Amino acid sequence: MNIIRTELPGVLIIEPKVFGDARGYFFESWNQAAYEAAGITNKWIQDNESKSCFGVLRGLHYQAAPYTQAKIVRAFMGTVLDVVVDIRKGSPTCGRHIAVELSGENKRQLYIPRGFAHGFAVLSDQAVFAYKCDNVYMPSAERGIIFDDPDLGIDWRIAPEKILLSDKDKKHTSFAGIEPWEEA
């Protein structure tokens, strides 16, 4: 696999080796030893999957301590724009974000360590998206940043009138209104 370091320290793009022929393709979507060699040593305890249609935007989500989560995310089917925002207190990149296209075609994965908010927007007609998490989901610890915060300036690549949000995601606060993440 190929590991691409991003401008946000710790956030990694993972490109698996895909073997394809007339029958289809094969690749290792998880190999503990290979991921550990790349510095990804989390103990994964939960896998989640969602299916969404074009324009759905989920995020920007994170959980407060002690329920913070690291994630490995990927699109099984379709195409999403995956966005990660650094919310680590004192980080030189706090408040900055990256956006990476993940798709069933490119098979890319994104490793998101603790201390980052995460969201994605569906760019294809439909997408099936998967998350590998290293901590449980805890509703009382759930937090979020509003997707269109002008201080973040995220281009979601979807016209604003086409974006579909949950009621919960419509109520998130601005980046300036969150309490930055601190490692416990």
Image (cartoon, rainbow, N blue to C red):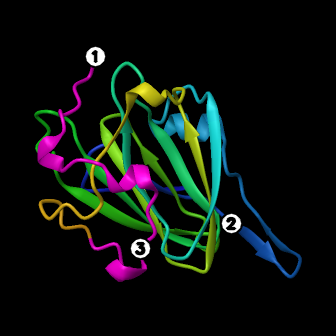
- In the image, is 36 to the left or to the right of 83? right
Give the numbered dot on residue 167.
none
On the image, which quarter does residue 68 sit in?
top left
Confirm whether the magenta stretch covers residue 160.
yes
Choose mark 3 or mark 1, whichever is in front.
3
Residue at (46% x, 69% y) in the render: 164
**Magenta span main SS:** loop
Q: Residues within 10 Å of mark 1 (few under 14, many from 20)?
A: few
Q: Is residue 77 visible?
A: yes
Q: Which mark is residue 184?
A: 1
Q: Earlier in the sequence, mark 1 or mark 2?
A: 2
Amino acid carrying label 1: it is Ala
Task: State the SS at label 1.
Answer: loop
Element assignment for label 2 = loop
Distance from the alpha carbon under mark 3 to that under mark 1? 35 Å
Which span is picked out in magenta? 155-184
Q: Is residue 138 above or below residue 84?
A: above
Q: Position of residue 135 (x, y in %)?
A: 51, 26
What is the residue that sits farthest to the front in this orientation? 167
Count neighbours of disc 2 (C-alpha within 10 A) and say few if under 14, some if 14 to 19, many if 20 or more. Answer: few
Where's the N terminus, which quadrant? bottom right
- The answer to whether residue 5 of the structure is visible from this angle is no
Instruction: Point out residue 161 in the picture as x, y percentages from the top left corner.
Output: 36, 81
Cα gap from disc 1 to disc 2, whole angstroms: 38 Å
Q: Which residue carries the number 3 mark?
A: 163
Q: Quadrant of residue 107?
A: bottom right
Question: Sequence order check: which comes first, mark 3 or mark 2?
Answer: 2
Up/down of 148 relative to 90, above or below: below
Nearest to the observer: residue 27 or residue 139: 139
